[in-house]
Image: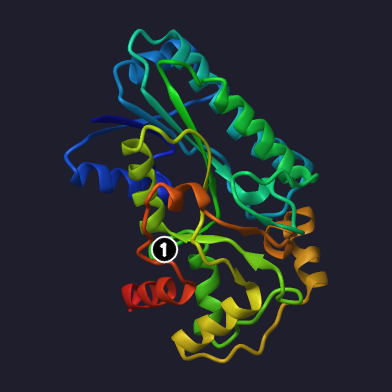
Amino acid sequence: MKIAICGMSGFVGSALRGYFEKQGDTVIGISVRKSSDAASIVQKVNGCDVLINLAGASILGRWSKSYKELLRTSRLDTTDKLVAAIALCTQPPHTLLNASAVGIYDSFHQHDESSRHLGDDFLAGLVHDWEYSAMRAQSDRTRVCTMRFGVVYGSAGGAMTKMLPPFKMGLGGKMGDGFQMVSWIHLEDLVRACAFLIEHTQIKGIVNLTSPEPISNMAQTKAMGRILHRPIFFDLPAWLVKLAFGEGSSVMLDSKEVYPKVLQENGFTFLYPTFDSAMVQIAHARD
């Protein structure tokens, strides 16, 4: 296959590139800038079998007015241009895998792909608009999957690069009351799930890319302390997280209990279904 990835230099994108190249696929990177127009993107996308769009500024941070605008433009403008390019292709990709996020769901219910209990905050609105933009590419020539990522854990980057250092120094602890549910996925399972979606052409629309066993922040904290053999006394109260991150603290404090029903019903198996199994692999890989 010939696979184009927008956002290939990032944590997830580089892992996808390595995986597909090992499979013998041709992988090319696409960079979409403010100056890029659809016609210039067509030159790279046309003739590709699959387009994977991962572009978007990190949601981890303090959401100032300007940063919220960056969160929107880095996702929506890029996706709009990619969709416009697909429409101009004489040989469009048969599959568009577009990144999305579990942040679209509310914090009060359990969710699978059929859930209609969506959030009403900035992040939920952003994800809704992002998915709407991507789904405009759905046609009889192109199939679209909007992949709602949970928190992605791996040994070489992502959230663990921020979580591990305090724990290794004995400064780990829960955030807020610790009861908020964390929906997560190991990087290796995420990559395998993307390949699974490409192969299983009957799947389209919303797909949750999360492990089948979400975990509370408190249970996650205890597991990290146990596996890393470190104490977990230094809790971060909610007010301090909010002081540091403002509105962006919702990413860490809001509960998201999400299940990957579509993947499981179509026969996908997780290598790391539990947080303990993922954490053991990550800890050993970093030793």
Seen as rendered, the residue at the extreme left is 24
Q: Hey, which quadrant is residue 20 in on the image?
A: top left
- Identify which residue is drawn at 39% across, 14% down: 42
Q: Is residue 113 above or below residue 36?
A: below
Under tag 1, what secondary structure? loop
149 relative position to 189: left or right = right
12 relative position to 109: left or right = left
Closer to the camera in the image, 243 or 105? 105
Q: Is residue 249 above or below residue 168?
A: above
Q: Quadrant of the C terminus?
A: bottom left
* Picture coordinates of residue 145, whole percent (x, y): 48, 34
Tell me which amino acid carries mark 1.
Answer: Gly
Q: Does the rendering let one see residue 39?
A: yes
Name the residue carrying label 1.
154
* Picture coordinates of residue 48, whole percent (x, y): 30, 23
- Identify which residue is drawn at 55% across, 55% down: 150
Q: Is residue 133 above or below residue 261?
A: above
* Picture coordinates of residue 75, whole percent (x, y): 59, 34
Q: Is residue 91 above or below residue 18?
A: above
Q: Quadrant of the N terminus?
A: top left
Q: Does the rendering let one see residue 73?
A: no
- Identify which residue is drawn at 71% across, 45% down: 123
